[in-house]
Amino acid sequence: MPLTTPRIAGVDVVRGLALLGMFSVHVFGAFEPDNSPTVAWQLAGGRSSATFALVAGVGLAFTTGGRTPRAGRGSFAAVTARALSVGLIGLLLGYAANAGGLEVDVILACYALLFLLALPLLALRARTLACIALTLGVVAPFLVHLLRGALPEPAFDGDPTLQDVVTDPAGLLGGLLVHGAYPVLAWMAYLCAGLAIGRLDLFDRRAAIRLLGGGLALAATAWLACSLWLFRWGGLERLRRNEFPDATGPHTRDEVLWDTPDGETWWSMISRAPHSTSPFDLLHTLGAATALLAAVLLLTRVTVVRRALLPLAAAGSMPLTLYTAHVLFLATGALNGSPGIQYAVLVAGSLLFAAGWRLSRGRGPLETVVAGAARRAREWERGRGRGRAQGSPPEPPVHRSERTESQDQHR
């Protein structure tokens, strides 16, 4: 199934870039042996996973009506089935990550909860969703900080698995909501922003330009405001004393700036480190992800650029498959002593597989499974609806253009 429109190609390209960024962080890690931050961490840490979540919101908007939201029972059933399927894959993947001793926080269970929490928001328009996203970006970090003391921490180490659903459900929920690397309560900001973007007319050049300007302004404002607090108003030293009291050596400054604080004190709210879940971190990465998406949407309006990026777009069209494959590959320990080669193998393998599969089969393997579950859930709900007394109006029909978007986004 070819990627024929700038809109679909642009979204898939950004998702592909986010995948490669997450791969780099998982391969190269956050810090060098001398405690200086790796290039991968400085460029992609936090930003790649935030972009991944934002584009997930765009895909969710596409599959629920695009510019005309469809929030009937069929859409609810389909999104719920999609969320449960992704969550199941994530919990199964946790076994491999734990067995391989990976320091990788598998994001899929968080995705599942994000999709479920988004159900009440599916009928909202773009402006309302954007306001919710910005509000969450400012307020949610403080709620997360407060609730960490109230909600139970996971009793298990490593990534969650199916076993933890039974043995530690409260800890699993607390871990997903506030304690983990991707606290869902705060990460709803990315999903809401993506939903808002997906409700816009992304074929409109002016919409993309406005997104680019707004994203750059938000990212720059958050970064500069944090810099003022850290470097002009003494925040860096207060952050070091309260969150990194044991930090010593020539790279202490780098550690305080780039390491994720434990969140033991309110001073963690002035950090801009990746995954610090501070307002500065959320708003900067939200703006950066929005600007990246807008820039790629504009670039892929040019046919030669769009064609040159087809392998990356193919990879971005099957993120669940490639994300799962990369965790399984890393869990084997292959090429652990050669991170550069390991990353090259991951990138080349992902691009080649995705391009070949896209040309020969279309939808990615795991995307096919998830889409099938969503389709069956929608059909089941429609079957139940025929047996109900007529009350609420049926969902509006899916127009052909929206159906094409939904099929190509696999979200």
Image: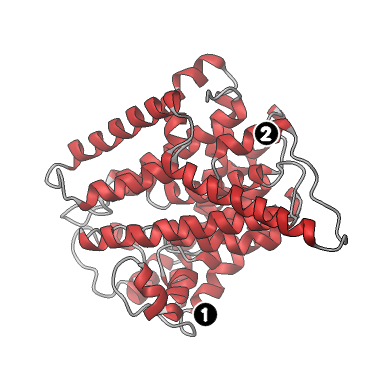
Closer to us: 109 or 133: 109
Give the x, y percent position of residue 171: 42, 79
Q: Are the residues flagged by discs 1 and 2 in contact, CB closer than 8 Å?
A: no
Q: CA distance from mark 1 to mark 2?
A: 38 Å
- Whether residue 67 is visible here, answered yes or no, is yes
Residue bearing mark 2:
202
Of label 1 and label 2, which has the lower sequence position? 1
Q: Is residue 241 above or below residue 200?
A: below
Q: Residue furthest bottom?
A: 150
Quadrant holding the C terminus: top right
Alpha-carbon neighbours of circle 1 within 10 Å: few (<14), some, or many (≥20)? few
> Residue sitting at 72 percent across and 53 percent down?
382
Q: Is residue 351 above or below residue 304?
A: below
Q: Which image quadrant is residue 80 in?
A: bottom right
> Residue sitting at 52 percent across and 21 percent down?
306
> Residue sitting at 29 percent across and 44 percent down?
39
Give the x, y percent position of residue 239: 38, 70
SS assignment at label 1:
helix
Q: Is residue 138 left or right of residue 340?
A: right
Closer to us: 249 or 169: 169
Residue bearing mark 1:
146
Closer to us: 223 or 10: 10
Give the x, y percent position of residue 5: 61, 24
Between marks 1 and 2 in the image, the one whose residue lies nearer the viewer? 2
